Amino acid sequence: MNPWPMVGADLRSLRWIAWIIPLLIALAVAIGVVVSAQERALRTASARAADDFDLLIGAPGSQTQLVLTAIYLQPEALPLLGGAILNRIVASAGVRDFAPLAFGDRIHGYPVGGTTTSFASRWGRLAPTEGRMFAAEGEAVVGADVRFPLGAELTPAHAAAGHRAPAGVESTEEGQHRHEGVRYTVVGRLPRLGTAWDAAILVPIESMWAAHGLGNGHAADGAPLGPPFDAKTIPGVPAVVVKPRSVADAYMLRGQYRQGGTMALFPAEVLVSLYQALGDIRDVLVFASSLNDVLIFAVTTALLLALAGMRRERVAVLRALGAPPSYVLLTVWIGAALILIVGCLAGLAIAQIASALASTIIASRTGLHLTATIGISDVAHVAWLIGLASAFALVPALAVYRTPVADTLRRG
């Protein structure tokens, strides 16, 4: 006998319940999938953002904060390295290139980073999509997300502690801390990197020093940008990015500058610990979401069990007309399983949409370009939930299957 006409009739009799239950299940399933997808996307994007930072050197302090400030442009005051260390680094064997980094200013909410043309071009790998690289003090290149055209005249402001305005918006605090008399002219725009530096304004580090009345790091005016710097006039820098000649040189330099008043690290060292913490949080959230799924399945099964009890007379009539017990079992099981399975599959679709939305929100706050996709592990998780749903659907089916036909008809 064909069970589908009976299944359709049962689902129609449920009316709005047949829609509400799958929706609740879909939302519960989607939460777990979104958490897992976002964790993977954040891990990939943050690792990609650190690709151009082979070795970071800073003054002794928090390694995590050094990475967050230098790579992800999270504002924080860092201890400074003295000028003599810069010249020592550039003279070290195994250094292919290096670039000091300076932070602390903002223009319309965009962070200003002082550095060298070597780092602005990512060691010669990048060419501006518009204009050219800065070649003199007072010039600037902007990231792909900075909404200033070439030729724009910009006045930096000292960032207020604990305050961060949205990118592209000049806050009241920024207006009160402008460096009057300081002007940067936009001469170029960099290609998109998918990192926080896409929303940054890059200027020669000499301009950053000069804007704060600290000289320009050179003994004589008119000296070309970049090294060698004058150790006596360098005001200090919070971070130095080093491009080693080889992997062996990278480890040698890391060991060399982990002493003598400096701190050296590979960003991956810090990211691994952050990923471990992030992974632990994800595991807890996914586990909690799975428990939530099981709870919703249990509540849904209890509801379906109650509804099955209300349909016992119909089932008893079918049995009296000659329908075998297996037909009744199959009909009730298919109806309950369809409700639960549709909810699981809908949750997968909702998770894809929610992941894209969450990626957009995270990207707007961190500058990282996230691509959250539903992976094999997520599909396997939903497949496991579908198997679990099928098992739960047997409960109302078995309850109806074991209903005594004669007693039910007598009571009816």
Image (cartoon, grey):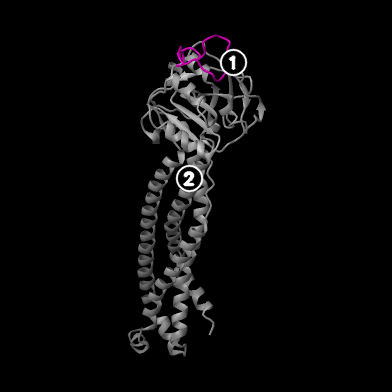
In the rendered view of the protein, which quadrant contains the C terminus? bottom left
Q: Nearer the viewer, residue 175 or 240?
A: 240
As for residue 218 lying within the magenta part, the answer is yes
| Left or right of residue 377, residue 404 in this image | left
The residue that label 1 is drawn on is 224
| Left or right of residue 295, residue 386 in this image | right
Q: Residues within 10 Å of mark 2 (few under 14, many from 20)?
A: many
Which residue is painted at 39% across and 60% down in the image? 290
* Most common SS among magenta residues: loop
As for residue 195 lying within the magenta part, the answer is no
- Say if residue 208 shows up in the picture: yes
Q: Secondary structure at mark 1?
A: loop
| Gap between marks 2 and 1 measured at Cα | 40 Å
Instruction: Give amino acid for label 2.
Output: Leu
Above/below status of 222 relative to 12: above
Which residue is painted at 39% across and 82% down in the image? 401
Q: Percent x, y for residue 188?
A: 63, 25
Q: Nearer the viewer, residue 333 or 224?
A: 224
Q: Percent x, y for residue 313?
A: 39, 82
Q: Secondary structure at mark 2?
A: helix
User: Which quarter of the picture shows residue 22?
Assistant: bottom left
Which residue is painted at 49% across and 50% down in the image? 354
- Say if residue 72 shows up in the picture: no
Instruction: Give amino acid for label 1.
Output: Pro
Q: Residues within 10 Å of mark 1 (few under 14, many from 20)?
A: some
Q: Marks 2 and 1: which is nearer the front?
A: 1
| Left or right of residue 153, residue 405 in this image | left
Which residue is painted at 54% across and 18% down in the image? 228
Residues rendered magenta in the picture: 212-234
Badge number at residue 42: 2
